Amino acid sequence: MATNVLTIPYPEELLLSLKENPKQFEDEARLLLAVKLYELGKVSTGMAAQLAGMGRVAFIFALGRFGLSPIGVEPDELAEDKANA
């Protein structure tokens, strides 16, 4: 499979304000892009994990940081369904 590269320039001041080094920032940016594409329903968890540079299971666990569910149902909806079952 061919690999494309996206280059996004950012100022050094951004790193200073976030108190991150380039690797930390770039890893988080990749994860944020992957999470957003998953949230919009544009990619699967597997594809999003690949984009984020992590395994699928790690990506699924990372979704919790953003209040997202890997099964396409919000946690509140799942709890409500369970309560009504």
Image: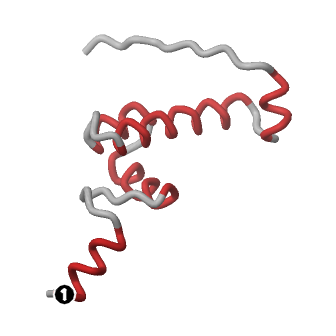
Pointer 1: residues within 10 angstroms few (<14), some, or many (20+)? few
Residue pictured at 28% horizontal, 35% vertical: 43
Label 1 is placed on what type of residue? Asn
**Closer-to-camera residue (82/57):** 82
**Closer-to-camera residue (8/73):** 73
Spot occupied by residue 32 in the image (x, y as percentages of width and height): 51, 39
Left or right of 29: which side holds 82? left
Left or right of 6: which side holds 20? right
Colouring method of the image: secondary structure
Spot occupied by residue 79 in the image (x, y as percentages of width and height): 30, 80
Residue pictured at 66% horizontal, 31% vertical: 23
- In which image quadrant can residue 44 be found? top left
Residue pictured at 33% horizontal, 64% vertical: 74
Tell me the residue that label 1 is attached to. 84
Q: SS of the residue at dot 1?
A: helix
Left or right of 37: which side holds 73? left
Instruction: Identify the image quadrant of the C terminus.
Output: bottom left
- In which image quadrant can residue 68 be found? bottom left
